[in-house]
Image (cartoon, rainbow, N blue to C red):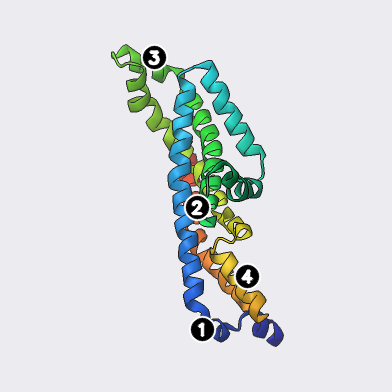
Amino acid sequence: MHALLRHFFYFSSVLPHWRAILDGFLLTVEMSVLTILVGIPLGLVLAVIRLLGVKAVNLLVMIYVDVFRAVPQLVIIVIFYFALPYGGISMGPATATVAALSLVLAALAEEIFWASIGAVPKGQWDAGRSTGLGFLSTLRYIILPQAIRMSVPPLTNRAIGISKSTTLGSVVAAPELLNITGSLQSNTANPSFLTVGALLFILLFLPLVRWSRWLEGQMQQRKV
C-alpha cells in the first residue's frame, strides 16, 4: 500500500507543475465545448436538409455521415493535421482535433436527430398543416421541439464520448490534459501526474454523466 501511495498519489511532487496541468485542463475544456457547439448544431442542420428530400443532396449527406461514422476518430485527426496542409489548409493541433471531432459528432448527431424526427407521429405534421402552417413552419414550431426533446439523452451520451476523445489530440501534440500529464509522467517517472489527470477528467465529465442519467430517467417517466 505504501508503494502504491508513493508512486501514484505522491501529489507534493505534482504541485510545482500545477500551472502546466491547469493549462492542459483548460484547453481540454475549451476543445470539448467547441466540439459540442459545432458538432450538434451541424448535425441538426444536416437532418433538416435531409427532410427537404433532394435526392442528390441526401446522397451526399448520407455518404458524409457513413464515412465519418466508419472511420476511426484518430485517423481523421491525423488526416486533418498532416494531410490537409498539402491542400493548402493548415491547422494547429488543437484546431485540427476540434474540427475532426466536430465532424464526427455532427455525423452521429444527424442520425440521432433524423431518428427522432421520424419518431414524431405523422399526425403532428397533419395537425400543423391543417392550421395553415407551411412545411418549414410546421417543422420549426411543432416537429423540431418534440424531436430535439427526444434527442437530448442520446445526444448527451454521444457528446460525452466524443469530448473524451479530445485526448486523441495528444497524437498530433495538442497540449491538452492527457498530453501534459503524460509528458510530465515520462519526464519525471512519476505516475502521480496521470492520477491527477484522471481526477481532473472525473471532475470534468462525471457531472455530465450524472446529468445524462437524470435526463434518461426523466424521459422514461414521460413515456409511462
Mark 2 and mark 4 in contact? Answer it, CB < 8 Å.
Answer: no
The amino acid type found where label 3 is placed reads Asp
Whether residue 132 is visible here, answered yes or no, is yes
Which residue is located at x 58 percent, y 27 percent?
62
Q: Position of residue 48 (x, y in %)?
A: 44, 26
Comparing 50 with 208, the one in front is 50
- Please state which of the two labelled residues, at mark 1 or mark 2, is closer to the viewer: 2
Which residue is located at x 67 percent, y 82 percent?
7
Q: Position of residue 127 (x, y in %)?
A: 35, 16
Q: Where is residue 143, by image quadrant?
A: top left
Q: Which residue is mark 1?
A: 16
The amino acid type found where label 4 is placed reads Gly
Q: Which one is earlier in the sequence, the residue at label 1 or at label 2?
A: 1
Q: Position of residue 44 (x, y in %)?
A: 45, 34
Q: Measured along the vertical axis of the image, is residue 94 above or below residue 19?
A: above
Q: Which residue is mark 3?
A: 126
Q: Classify mark 3: helix, strand or loop.
A: helix
Q: CA distance from mark 1 to mark 4?
A: 16 Å
Q: Which one is earlier in the sequence, the residue at label 3 or at label 2?
A: 2
- Residue 95, numbered label: 2
Q: CA distance from mark 3 to mark 2?
A: 44 Å
Q: CA distance from mark 1 to mark 2?
A: 28 Å
- Quadrant containing the N terminus is bottom right
Numbered marks: total: 4
Q: Measured along the vertical axis of the image, is residue 171 above or below residue 135?
A: below
